[in-house]
Amino acid sequence: MPAGGFSASSGMDFEAKITPMVITSCVTAATGGLMFGYDIGISGGVTAMEDFQREFFPTVLRKRRENKGSNYCRYNNQVLQLFTSSLYLAGLVSTLFASYTTRRLGRRATMRIAGGFFIVGVVFNGAARNLGMLIVGRILLGCGVGFANQAIPLFLSEVAPTTIRGGLNTLFQLNITIGILFASLVNYGTNKYLPVGRQPCFAHFSTIYI
């Protein structure tokens, strides 16, 4: 068997080729991991901000102020837990549907669906004026994550040449980590930022609760 190729039942040998188009396609597809990583990292930092709690979770803010100096049960709130876990639950359920679309519609179509879910979810979260919109946005983001996590690794495995398949597959995990890092930097930069025209305060690092 040639290196990087495989033998089909017909006896024909196929040699995988490393081309700029293949590398570009794999690198671009792997960036879908940024969605998952950013969603993992950003939610913890945002839910720890007082402005966010005042708007959507006043009970958590009141308990937080009552328990100053202690983290015990400070974030023990079922609605807050629903907000946090809705993305992961939606991602788990949507993965079951994504397996069907990857088989029937293809990997690229499924990745486009994931991007669509993500865009709509971002719009809902950005325009949220109540808790319902916030959770709907998180569910849509979770659907995007579920579809992306189903299709992208398959796409990378099928497109990448066997000689560098492991490295290109690792790009997806790398992008998840980069997304978490970027979210942490955003949390750091926006911590203590008040919507009254003040500049962000970089003196403290917002703790991430995942």
Image (cartoon, grey):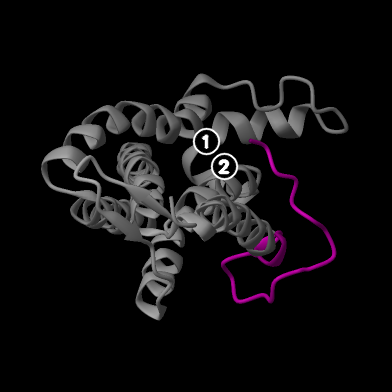
Instruction: Report the side of 203 relative to 21 (left or right).
Output: right
* Predominant SS of the magenta segment: loop
Q: Nearer the viewer, residue 59 or 79?
A: 79
Which residue is at the far right? Answer: 69
Was residue 59 drawn as part of the magenta stretch in this picture?
A: no
Q: Nearer the viewer, residue 105 or 120?
A: 105
Residue 129 appears in the rendering: no
Rendered view: 149 above or below 196: above
Q: Callout 1, which amino acid?
A: Phe
- Residue 57, label in figure: 1
What segment is highlighted magenta in the picture?
188-210
Task: Write down the residue under mark 2.
Answer: 53
Q: Secondary structure at mark 1?
A: loop
Q: Nearer the viewer, residue 202 or 4?
A: 4
The location of residue 195, given as percent across then percent down, is 56, 67
Q: Secondary structure at mark 2?
A: helix
Q: Quadrant of the C terminus?
A: top right
Was residue 191 drawn as part of the magenta stretch in this picture?
A: yes
Instruction: Report the side of 116 relative to 184 (left or right).
Output: left
Instruction: Report the side of 44 relative to 96 (left or right).
Output: right
Q: Callout 2, which amino acid?
A: Gln
The location of residue 205, given as percent across then percent down, is 79, 56
Rendered view: 67 above or below 200: above
Which residue is at the far front? Answer: 11
Q: Residue at x 21, y 52 (%)?
A: 113
Q: How far separated are the C-alphas under marks 2 and 1?
A: 4 Å
